[in-house]
Structure formats: structure tokens, C-alpha cells
Amino acid sequence: MKEKIKKFGKPVGNVICILSVFFLFTALVRTDFDVSQITDWRSFLFVFAVSTGLKTATVFMSASAWCLWLEFFAKRRCDRREALRVYAKANIGKYLPGNVMHYVERNLFAGKLKLSQKQVAAASICEIVSLVSAAFFTGMLLAFSKVRDTLAVIWQAGGVFNKWAVWLAAVVIPAVLAALYFAGRKKVRSRAAEKKISAADFFSFFHTFAAAFLLYAAVLIVLGLILAVIYFYLGGRPTIRQALEMTAAYMIAWVLGFIIPGAPGGIGVRETALTLLLTPVTGRDMIVVLSVLHRLVTVAGDFTSYLLRKKLWRIKENPR
């Protein structure tokens, strides 16, 4: 079975990659951005280039967090450059219909990382958990009321959500997942070893979770600040509180686009959520233009990371 995966994995992965590039450009065309609205090209290109560079950096930051989980499940250090290449290549798979192909691509390229399919899949699952946790925790720190109101709208629960319930869920869910993982993990050691999980295992798990959490929090903050910068470029003058609310709102919108199946690259879901959340801050007309420009930056950043991954491919590890 493993030999069949190795045999067909690479060509299938390459086909998916080609389709991903096609759908990525389709997403770019679908933004329907009217270039005639640009009055100062120099300022626009500067803001666009800086924002795209920041977005590209977040892709590799996310890849680093994923690599932490790979190393946890593999119980050894992984080739981080190879992991970055695989992640950046698979990342554009999210633009395929279904919004799940980037996970499939990671497993198809698992052979490059010398890891099993289960290890790669487990790392991706923990990635989602730590990412969502980072979004809610960081969002609450920046603007709790915005996150609370967002949850109330999404699940139509009105006042059910309160500070303690949300914080409790954010703490309990990762803890339960960790407990399930350690309880269900099969070991090849002796029966005595199976019954005992060392403190080092727990420390390793939560150390990995904390490191990934901080990386994802930084990623989401950067993406949210890009939104605020674009808003400033468009003529808005947000206060510090409004900038924090915009960042928190974007975190929620980004995660929704990330986890909802069927939305290629989160297209549609993210913009709809932003319109709902930020119209009171920016106005409806402004948020539409803001969402389109941010989408352009997102697509450009994803494609740039894909191209840079080819550059990384040519870089050999320095012998030590």
C-alpha cells in the first residue's frame, strides 16, 4: 500500500498543484477589482508590496507551526526547509473547490518529509485546533465584545456566550484532545510502559501547543493589521480601539473561511463575515473595497510563497 502511494502520490500531487494554480488565478480574477479606482499608483504599489510581503511571511510562519507538530508526532527533528516547501506548495490547494485539498496534498508529499501518513494527518488536525484556539484567545484579548457578539451571531445564541464559557471552552477543548491522544496512543513498548505516560510527554505536547499557539497568534495579528493598514490607505482613520476590533474581526472571519468546507480559499465566507462585522466601523461601501483589496493581497501572498518555495528548493542544507 505504501509503495502504491509513493508511486502515484507524486503525479497526483503535481496534477492537484497545477489545478490549484489555475483556481488561484481564477480567484484573483473573481475579485473584480476596478483599477480605475487607483489614483496614486506609487502609493498603491508600495502598500500592496509591503502587505503581500507580510502575507507571504505568515505562510512560512504557519508552516513553522505545522512543522512543530510534525516533530512532536515523529519524535525527532524534521527537515524544516523540506516542511516549508511542502507546506507552501500544498497551501495553494485550498483554492480548489472543497477547501480541503491542501490537507490532501500534504499527505501526498509526506514521503518527502520521511513521515507516515498518520503523522502528517495528526499534525494537520492539531494545527486546526491550535489555530482556532489562537484565534479565539487572541481575539478576546484584543476585543472581547467583538468576539462575543460574533459568536452570538454565528450560532444565533444571543446571550448564551459569556466570558467564562468561552475561556473555559478554549482551555478544555485542547486539554480533552490531548488526553484523548495520550489515552488512545498505541505504543510498541512493554505493557508497563503502555500504562504510564511520562511527564515529559505531557510537557512536550503542551510546549508544542504553546509554541504553535504563539506563532498562529502572530500570523492572525499580522493579517488583521494588514486589513487596518489598507483601511488607512483608503482614507480611513481608525482609532486604536477600532484597529483592535478590525484585527479581532478579521481573526474570526479568517478562521471561518479556513474551516468551512466548500469555500475555496475561504472566498465568500471571509468577505461575508467581514461585511457583517465591520460595516458599523467602516461603512458598507468601504468594507466591500477593503475586502477586495485584502483578498488581492492574500492571493498574491499565497502565490508568492509558492514561488519562493521553488527558490528554497534549490537551497541545500549547510553541513554542520
Image: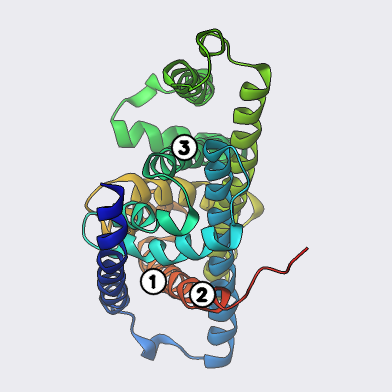
Distance from disc 1 to disc 2, alpha carbons, whole Å, reads 9 Å
Query: Residue 272 appears at what percent x and percent y?
Result: 30, 55
Residue with the mark numbered 2: 234
User: Sequence order check: which comes first, mark 2 or mark 3?
Assistant: 3
Q: Secondary structure at mark 3?
A: helix
Query: Residue 16 appears at what percent x and percent y?
Result: 26, 67
Identified at 41% across, 46% down, the residue is: 255
Disc 3 crowd, CA 10 A, few/some/many (<14, 14-19, 20+): many
Does the CB distance between marks 1 and 2 fall below 8 Å? yes
For the residue pair 174 and 2, the one nearer the viewer reads as 2
Q: Say whether residue 207 is left or right of residue 20.
A: right
Q: Secondary structure at mark 2?
A: loop
Q: Secondary structure at mark 1?
A: helix
User: Sequence order check: which comes first, mark 1 or mark 2?
Assistant: 2
Check the image and name the residue furthest to the right.
320
Task: Please identify, in this view, whether the residue under mark 1 or under mark 3 is nearer the observer.
Answer: 3
Q: Is residue 236 visible?
A: no
User: Disc 1 marks which amino acid?
Assistant: Val
Residue with the mark numbered 1: 289
Query: Residue 251 appears at what percent x and percent y?
Result: 48, 48
Residue with the mark numbered 3: 126
Look at the picture and state if 99 lies above or below 49.
above
